[in-house]
Image (cartoon, grey):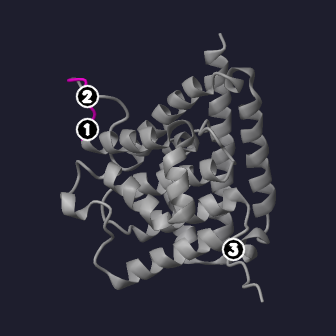
Amino acid sequence: MTAPDPLAPLVELPGVAAAGEEARESLALAHRHKANRRGWPATAAEAAMRAARASSVLDGGSLVLGPDGEPDAVLSGALRVAEALEGGATTLVGVWQRAPLQAIARLHALAAADLTDDDRLGRPRADPGVGRRLEMLADVVTGTRAPAPIVAAVVHGELLTLEPFGVADGVVARGVARLVTIASGLDTHGLGVPEKSWMQKPGDYRAAARGFASGTREGLAAWLIACSKALRAGAREALAIAEAAGK
Protein backbone atom coordinates (compact mmCIF):
# COMPACT_ATOMS: atom_id res chain seq x y z
CA MET A 1 0.00 0.00 0.00
CA THR A 2 1.39 3.40 -1.00
CA ALA A 3 2.01 5.76 1.90
CA PRO A 4 0.07 9.01 1.78
CA ASP A 5 1.94 12.02 0.43
CA PRO A 6 2.75 14.23 3.45
CA LEU A 7 2.43 17.42 1.39
CA ALA A 8 -0.85 16.50 -0.31
CA PRO A 9 -2.97 18.43 2.24
CA LEU A 10 -1.01 21.60 1.44
CA VAL A 11 -1.99 21.41 -2.21
CA GLU A 12 -5.63 21.59 -1.15
CA LEU A 13 -5.27 24.77 0.90
CA PRO A 14 -7.22 27.70 -0.61
CA GLY A 15 -5.32 29.55 -3.31
CA VAL A 16 -2.13 27.49 -3.04
CA ALA A 17 -2.37 25.40 -6.21
CA ALA A 18 -3.44 28.37 -8.33
CA ALA A 19 -0.59 30.54 -7.03
CA GLY A 20 1.90 27.78 -7.75
CA GLU A 21 0.63 27.35 -11.30
CA GLU A 22 0.91 31.09 -11.92
CA ALA A 23 4.52 30.93 -10.72
CA ARG A 24 5.22 28.04 -13.07
CA GLU A 25 3.74 29.89 -16.05
CA SER A 26 5.71 33.04 -15.26
CA LEU A 27 9.00 31.18 -15.06
CA ALA A 28 8.24 29.27 -18.26
CA LEU A 29 7.66 32.60 -20.01
CA ALA A 30 11.03 33.87 -18.80
CA HIS A 31 12.75 30.74 -20.11
CA ARG A 32 11.13 31.24 -23.51
CA HIS A 33 12.49 34.78 -23.90
CA LYS A 34 14.73 34.96 -26.97
CA ALA A 35 17.72 36.11 -24.89
CA ASN A 36 17.42 32.99 -22.73
CA ARG A 37 17.17 30.40 -25.49
CA ARG A 38 20.90 30.31 -26.14
CA GLY A 39 22.23 33.14 -24.03
CA TRP A 40 20.94 31.80 -20.73
CA PRO A 41 24.42 31.28 -19.18
CA ALA A 42 24.92 35.05 -19.13
CA THR A 43 21.45 35.86 -17.81
CA ALA A 44 21.71 33.06 -15.24
CA ALA A 45 24.99 34.52 -14.00
CA GLU A 46 23.37 37.93 -13.55
CA ALA A 47 20.38 36.35 -11.80
CA ALA A 48 22.70 34.48 -9.44
CA MET A 49 24.52 37.69 -8.55
CA ARG A 50 21.28 39.54 -7.82
CA ALA A 51 19.98 36.62 -5.78
CA ALA A 52 23.16 36.53 -3.70
CA ARG A 53 23.07 40.24 -2.93
CA ALA A 54 19.43 40.15 -1.88
CA SER A 55 19.94 37.04 0.25
CA SER A 56 22.91 38.69 1.93
CA VAL A 57 20.87 41.73 2.91
CA LEU A 58 18.16 39.54 4.42
CA ASP A 59 20.78 37.95 6.71
CA GLY A 60 22.23 41.30 7.74
CA GLY A 61 25.01 41.43 5.17
CA SER A 62 25.78 44.03 2.55
CA LEU A 63 24.25 44.50 -0.88
CA VAL A 64 27.46 45.54 -2.61
CA LEU A 65 31.20 45.16 -2.25
CA GLY A 66 32.94 47.28 0.37
CA PRO A 67 35.20 50.30 -0.30
CA ASP A 68 38.15 47.92 -0.65
CA GLY A 69 36.35 45.96 -3.34
CA GLU A 70 35.79 42.97 -1.07
CA PRO A 71 32.45 41.54 0.13
CA ASP A 72 31.68 41.19 3.82
CA ALA A 73 31.44 37.72 5.37
CA VAL A 74 27.70 37.31 4.78
CA LEU A 75 27.83 38.49 1.19
CA SER A 76 30.88 36.30 0.55
CA GLY A 77 28.91 33.27 1.67
CA ALA A 78 25.86 34.22 -0.36
CA LEU A 79 28.04 34.67 -3.43
CA ARG A 80 29.60 31.23 -2.96
CA VAL A 81 26.16 29.67 -2.67
CA ALA A 82 24.99 31.50 -5.78
CA GLU A 83 28.05 30.38 -7.73
CA ALA A 84 27.43 26.76 -6.73
CA LEU A 85 23.84 27.01 -7.98
CA GLU A 86 24.47 29.15 -11.05
CA GLY A 87 23.08 28.00 -14.37
CA GLY A 88 21.62 24.69 -13.26
CA ALA A 89 23.99 23.36 -10.59
CA THR A 90 24.37 19.93 -12.19
CA THR A 91 26.53 18.51 -9.38
CA LEU A 92 24.36 19.80 -6.55
CA VAL A 93 21.17 18.70 -8.31
CA GLY A 94 22.46 15.12 -8.30
CA VAL A 95 23.38 15.33 -4.63
CA TRP A 96 19.98 16.82 -3.76
CA GLN A 97 18.13 14.05 -5.56
CA ARG A 98 20.19 11.30 -3.88
CA ALA A 99 20.84 12.75 -0.43
CA PRO A 100 19.12 16.06 0.40
CA LEU A 101 20.85 16.48 3.75
CA GLN A 102 24.27 16.31 2.08
CA ALA A 103 23.25 19.08 -0.32
CA ILE A 104 22.03 21.22 2.57
CA ALA A 105 25.30 20.63 4.43
CA ARG A 106 27.34 21.59 1.37
CA LEU A 107 25.48 24.84 0.97
CA HIS A 108 25.94 25.65 4.63
CA ALA A 109 29.68 25.03 4.33
CA LEU A 110 29.74 27.61 1.53
CA ALA A 111 27.46 30.13 3.22
CA ALA A 112 29.12 30.06 6.64
CA ALA A 113 32.79 29.61 5.71
CA ASP A 114 33.72 33.07 7.02
CA LEU A 115 31.21 33.10 9.87
CA THR A 116 32.00 30.09 12.05
CA ASP A 117 34.67 27.52 12.89
CA ASP A 118 35.53 24.93 10.28
CA ASP A 119 34.34 22.07 12.46
CA ARG A 120 30.83 23.56 12.50
CA LEU A 121 30.47 23.90 8.75
CA GLY A 122 27.67 21.72 7.46
CA ARG A 123 26.93 20.42 10.95
CA PRO A 124 23.52 21.05 12.53
CA ARG A 125 23.21 22.35 16.06
CA ALA A 126 23.69 19.76 18.80
CA ASP A 127 19.98 19.35 19.42
CA PRO A 128 18.33 15.96 18.81
CA GLY A 129 15.14 17.72 17.77
CA VAL A 130 16.94 19.54 14.98
CA GLY A 131 18.41 16.32 13.62
CA ARG A 132 15.01 14.61 13.63
CA ARG A 133 13.36 17.55 11.85
CA LEU A 134 16.02 17.53 9.15
CA GLU A 135 15.63 13.80 8.63
CA MET A 136 11.86 14.25 8.35
CA LEU A 137 12.39 17.04 5.82
CA ALA A 138 14.65 14.78 3.73
CA ASP A 139 12.03 12.02 3.81
CA VAL A 140 9.33 14.46 2.73
CA VAL A 141 11.19 15.93 -0.23
CA THR A 142 12.29 12.54 -1.54
CA GLY A 143 8.83 11.04 -1.21
CA THR A 144 6.43 13.79 -2.22
CA ARG A 145 4.69 14.29 -5.54
CA ALA A 146 3.59 17.82 -4.68
CA PRO A 147 4.17 20.59 -7.24
CA ALA A 148 7.64 22.14 -7.18
CA PRO A 149 6.53 25.57 -5.89
CA ILE A 150 5.08 23.90 -2.81
CA VAL A 151 8.14 21.73 -2.21
CA ALA A 152 10.44 24.73 -2.56
CA ALA A 153 8.32 26.75 -0.14
CA VAL A 154 8.23 23.98 2.46
CA VAL A 155 11.99 23.48 2.34
CA HIS A 156 12.55 27.23 2.50
CA GLY A 157 10.18 27.71 5.43
CA GLU A 158 11.47 24.76 7.43
CA LEU A 159 15.15 25.69 7.13
CA LEU A 160 14.46 29.38 7.72
CA THR A 161 12.42 28.89 10.89
CA LEU A 162 14.20 25.82 12.31
CA GLU A 163 17.61 27.57 12.02
CA PRO A 164 19.34 24.19 12.07
CA PHE A 165 22.89 25.56 11.99
CA GLY A 166 22.58 28.71 14.07
CA VAL A 167 24.49 30.80 11.51
CA ALA A 168 23.81 31.61 7.83
CA ASP A 169 20.49 29.76 8.04
CA GLY A 170 18.65 32.31 5.91
CA VAL A 171 21.17 32.19 3.08
CA VAL A 172 21.05 28.40 3.22
CA ALA A 173 17.24 28.30 3.26
CA ARG A 174 16.95 30.53 0.22
CA GLY A 175 19.76 28.67 -1.53
CA VAL A 176 18.14 25.29 -0.99
CA ALA A 177 14.79 26.64 -2.18
CA ARG A 178 16.57 27.83 -5.32
CA LEU A 179 18.11 24.38 -5.70
CA VAL A 180 14.65 22.79 -5.51
CA THR A 181 13.35 25.01 -8.32
CA ILE A 182 16.36 24.05 -10.46
CA ALA A 183 16.31 20.32 -9.68
CA SER A 184 12.56 20.06 -10.26
CA GLY A 185 12.69 21.77 -13.64
CA LEU A 186 10.57 24.67 -12.42
CA ASP A 187 13.47 27.04 -13.11
CA THR A 188 15.99 24.77 -14.80
CA HIS A 189 18.67 27.41 -15.40
CA GLY A 190 18.09 29.44 -12.25
CA LEU A 191 16.92 32.54 -14.10
CA GLY A 192 14.46 33.80 -11.48
CA VAL A 193 15.34 36.11 -8.62
CA PRO A 194 12.63 35.65 -5.94
CA GLU A 195 15.12 36.79 -3.31
CA LYS A 196 14.79 40.38 -4.51
CA SER A 197 11.10 40.57 -3.65
CA TRP A 198 11.82 39.22 -0.16
CA MET A 199 14.57 41.79 0.29
CA GLN A 200 12.22 44.60 -0.70
CA LYS A 201 9.64 43.57 1.92
CA PRO A 202 11.59 41.94 4.75
CA GLY A 203 8.84 42.53 7.29
CA ASP A 204 6.30 40.69 5.17
CA TYR A 205 8.85 37.92 4.58
CA ARG A 206 9.45 37.35 8.27
CA ALA A 207 5.76 37.59 9.12
CA ALA A 208 4.93 34.98 6.49
CA ALA A 209 7.69 32.74 7.85
CA ARG A 210 6.20 33.01 11.33
CA GLY A 211 2.89 31.93 9.83
CA PHE A 212 4.57 28.87 8.38
CA ALA A 213 6.15 28.05 11.73
CA SER A 214 2.75 28.31 13.43
CA GLY A 215 1.56 25.27 11.49
CA THR A 216 -1.98 26.62 11.16
CA ARG A 217 -3.88 26.23 7.90
CA GLU A 218 -4.00 29.99 7.49
CA GLY A 219 -0.31 30.44 8.26
CA LEU A 220 0.77 27.65 5.95
CA ALA A 221 -1.41 28.86 3.10
CA ALA A 222 -0.16 32.43 3.47
CA TRP A 223 3.47 31.30 3.34
CA LEU A 224 2.98 29.01 0.35
CA ILE A 225 1.14 31.71 -1.59
CA ALA A 226 3.74 34.32 -0.65
CA CYS A 227 6.51 32.05 -1.92
CA SER A 228 4.70 31.55 -5.23
CA LYS A 229 4.21 35.29 -5.54
CA ALA A 230 7.94 35.75 -4.94
CA LEU A 231 8.65 33.26 -7.72
CA ARG A 232 6.42 35.29 -10.04
CA ALA A 233 8.23 38.48 -9.05
CA GLY A 234 11.51 36.66 -9.61
CA ALA A 235 10.34 35.68 -13.08
CA ARG A 236 9.62 39.33 -13.87
CA GLU A 237 13.16 40.12 -12.75
CA ALA A 238 14.39 37.38 -15.08
CA LEU A 239 12.54 39.01 -17.97
CA ALA A 240 14.10 42.37 -17.12
CA ILE A 241 17.55 40.77 -17.15
CA ALA A 242 16.78 39.12 -20.49
CA GLU A 243 15.51 42.35 -22.00
CA ALA A 244 18.68 44.16 -20.96
CA ALA A 245 20.82 41.34 -22.35
CA GLY A 246 19.01 41.49 -25.66
CA LYS A 247 19.67 45.17 -26.28
Q: Amino acid at mark 1?
A: Asp
Cα gap from disc 2 to disc 3, whole angstroms: 43 Å
Tag 1–tag 2 contact (CB < 8 Å): yes
Q: Main secondary structure of the magenta part?
A: loop
The residue positioned 50% from the left and 66% from the top of the image is 99
Q: Is residue 90 left or right of residue 79?
A: right
> Is residue 219 shown to the viewer in this render?
no
In this figure, which residue is indicated by the disc labeled 3?
A: 7
Q: In the rendered image, which quarter is residue 97 located in?
A: bottom right
Query: Is 117 located above or below residue 24 in the figure?
Result: below
Looking at the picture, tell me which residue is in the foreground, 219 or 179.
179
Q: Secondary structure at mark 1?
A: loop
Q: Is residue 37 left or right of residue 196?
A: right
- Residue 221 at x, y percent in the picture: 69, 67
Tag 2 or tag 1, which sits nearer the N-term?
Answer: 2
Numbered mark located on residue 66 in the image: 2
- Residue 206 at x, y percent in the picture: 49, 59
- Residue 46 at x, y percent in the picture: 51, 27
The residue positioned 47% from the left and 57% from the top of the image is 173
